[in-house]
Amino acid sequence: MAIQTINPFSNELIKSFQEMSPEVVAVEISIADETFQSWRKTSFPRRADLLHGIAKLMRKQTDELAKLITLEMGKLLAQSYAEIALSADIIDYYATNGESFLSDQKLETEFGEAYIKSTPIGVLLGVEPWNFPFYQVARFAAPNIMAGNVVLVKHASNVPQCALAIQELFVQAGAPKGLYTNLFVSGSRIEQVIADPRIKGVALTGSETAGASIAAAAGKHLKKSVLELGGSDAFIVLEDADIDKAVDWAVVGRMNNTGQCCVAAKRIIVLEAVADEFLDKFKAKLSDLKVGDPMDEATELGPLSSEGAVIQLIEQVQRTVRAGAKVLLGGKLIDRKGAFIEATILGDIKPGMAAYHEELFGPVASFYRVKSEQEAIDLANDSPFGLGGSIFTNDIERGKRLAEKIDTGMVFINHPTWTQPDLPFGGTKGSGYGRELSSLGIQEFVNKKLIRVSELTDPF
């Protein structure tokens, strides 16, 4: 497996790394397991102090870390800065709230006393993606370390310097060796790691294919798993919406991270009464996006993460068009060095076409016209995915009523699907299971131990 930094703006190979041997991985697991035996006994204040220190270091090194993100996977620099800020906020959030989230839960019982105590379960494996190389790791590592677990992280092979930088933050903050460990291993070796009896759980953010593989391995070895997989979020615009604001949010929702986001607004569903107005304004906004170097603050549309990502996306577009869909905007590779594709809108999409059923991971929007709100909901739910979605309307009660009918893990009203530390993140159907972030995110990998106290004279 190639573990390399390849700048997607220039296609230049920057740096290569060696994959760890099975023997080295075994040693790292042993160290992590030894560290867990002591870390599990540390106090919440001790854990919180370490995490606050890591967040402080992350903010102090924002310039360096943000540029590393942009170098390795092509994110616009301003968005890389925002990712570092969000990641630090998540770490601080769990440092501040973790103890209260895991406090003993008293149970009402007929006699005596009973309560639930949350205890750590051990060494956890996180398999993390390239599209948000710090944020995704923060939302896995911070709550679990605060809970008293320790973590191993197999990061995506195209962001190795980000992977090492995260581990280095733990070192600089004084974390014990083995609390956070980066593993340079190929995806084909993950089942071997999961099979190790010292690994007690696994979390993955990635594709459906990877999720199915991880879930099968975890199930085979009776390990708990949490999966956050792909998405094809519906962005529903009702006839009473503020169209200008909806268009602005559609551009953000679809083009954030160059469209390489699980919760991107991939399917734009607009009521017929306002469809023409919305489409005209949406096309104009996307047509005006400035293409260029993601390190340049003026750039609005940068490269995808790799040449391979561009090839896959353009192939999906072409298959959709060959099946009868229309290109309403863009649809082609940009004639320049780097992993660039035009901002694209596809229309006349029907069931059976690639864009109807598959996740399009890049700056390609699928546009649909519908005649009624029920047709909008039916279309939104006609997807193998169920991660997020959004509804735009000036009638909030109407929006909430429709939101309850959408079969996803998250629905936002008058905002594209988004993320913040105190909101749970996760989906249904092919988008996975379990939750990260909020109070729910720290509950996934703890043992909910019942402690029952009875008097000797209490009846059975």
Image (spheres, grey):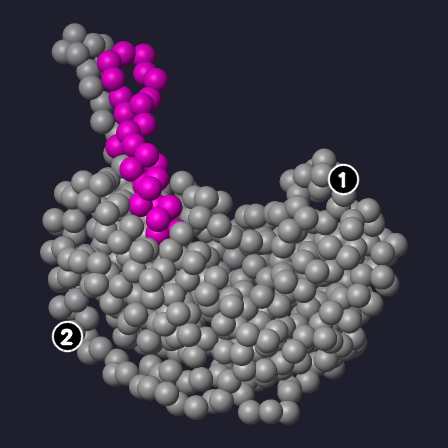
Q: Residue at x 41, y 85 (%)?
A: 6
Q: Residue at x 28, y 25 (%)?
A: 115
Amino acid beneath label 1: Asp
Question: Where does residue 271 sit, x and y in percent of width and height?
Answer: 82, 54
Q: Nearer the viewer, residue 55 or 154?
A: 55
Residue of label 1: 395
- Give above or below for 237 relative to 166: above
Q: Residue at x 54, y 68 (%)?
A: 257
The answer to whether 63 appears left or right of 378 in the picture is left
- Give above or below for 167 relative to 243: below
Residue of label 2: 23
Question: Where does residue 68 sit, x and y in percent of width and height?
Answer: 39, 75
The answer to whether 70 appears left or right of 179 in the picture is right
Numbered disc 1: secondary structure: loop
Amino acid beneath label 2: Glu
Q: Which residues are magenta?
A: 90-117
- Give above or below for 413 relative to 26: above
